[in-house]
Amino acid sequence: MNGIGSKPMLDQLAELARSRPLVVVHGGGARVTSWLERLGVPTRFEDGLRVTDEASLEVTSAVLRGALHVELVAALRARGCDAVGLSGVDGGLLTGRRVPGKGLVATAAGVRAGIIDTLLAAGHVPVIAPLALDEQGAVCNVNADDAAAGLARGLGATRLVLLTDVDGIRAADGSRIARTGADQAERLIADGVIGGGMIPKVRAALSGIAAVPGASAVIADGSGPDVVRRVLEDADLGTRIVAA
């Protein structure tokens, strides 16, 4: 979620949690990059994913499950939100499948949904750092959108919200695409209209809703006013992605 650490976003999440079950998955790419640069650890991206070796994974884990994670959980709890922090490694919550050529990077291939169900039933708000164990038990970095999509699939969620720094998918002429499905999205990727970090975001959205009839995902700008409520109620905000 873009801007998740900002006061307005934290206020909105705490308010939403009072009215419905909520699972928060956070990224932290900018914070990770800052720490990698500070420590002199090289970093590079391919197809919108950070290529992760052992040195960069150590920093990534320290930021995602450490400093940033603790700050978010503490801030939500200060707002009366009964947040509980986990990573995908805790309790084997996320099972990862290694992404070829990206080092210690995995997709979210499986979810122990019972862990989240138990927390939600008790009134907690799970806050998830996107890490997972791969098939050999190695800790891997997971794209936050992919982690959110994996959790949505595992929980049978009907709504997946992916917040970023742009107000949805843009067409070749720069106009915002209000609604799309898998076929159009893949054509836009093939034509180079969708590129960079938007590629894994769009594919995560599609995979997160594919197995749940009537489910939808929204990609929207997380910095807008009252965006959390509006993205759930306003069909014209961001880009709405639907299953075929």
Image (spheres, rainbow, N blue to C red):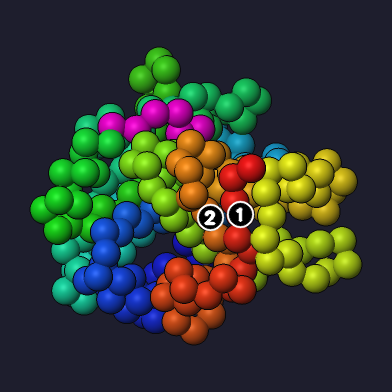
**Which residue type does callout 1 highlight?**
Ile
Q: Which residue is mark 1?
A: 241
Density class for disc 1 (Cα within 10 Å; few <14, some 14-19, many ≥20) is: many
Q: Which residue is mark 2?
A: 217
Q: Establish if 20 lies above or below 199.
A: below
Mark 2 and mark 1 lie on one chain; the one further toward the N terminus is 2
- Left or right: residue 67 versus residue 39 is left
Q: Residue furthest bottom?
A: 225
How many marks overall? Answer: 2
User: Answer yes or no: do the residues labelled 2 and 1 have beta carbons within 8 Å?
Assistant: yes
Give the x, y percent position of residue 96: 44, 28
**Tag 1's secondary structure?**
strand
Give the x, y percent position of residue 88: 34, 38
Residue ID at (19%, 52%): 120
User: Which of the pair 122/49 is nearer the observer?
Assistant: 122
Q: Residue furthest front?
A: 213
Q: Is residue 34 visible?
A: no
User: Which of the pair 121/131 is nearer the observer?
Assistant: 121
Q: Is residue 190 visible?
A: yes
Q: Residue furthest left?
A: 122
**Image quadrant where one finds the C terminus:** top right
Q: Quadrant of residue 155?
A: top left
**Tag 2's secondary structure?**
strand
Q: Establish if 176 lies above or below 54.
A: below
Q: Establish if 173 lies above or below 223.
A: above
Magenta stretch bounds: 107-112
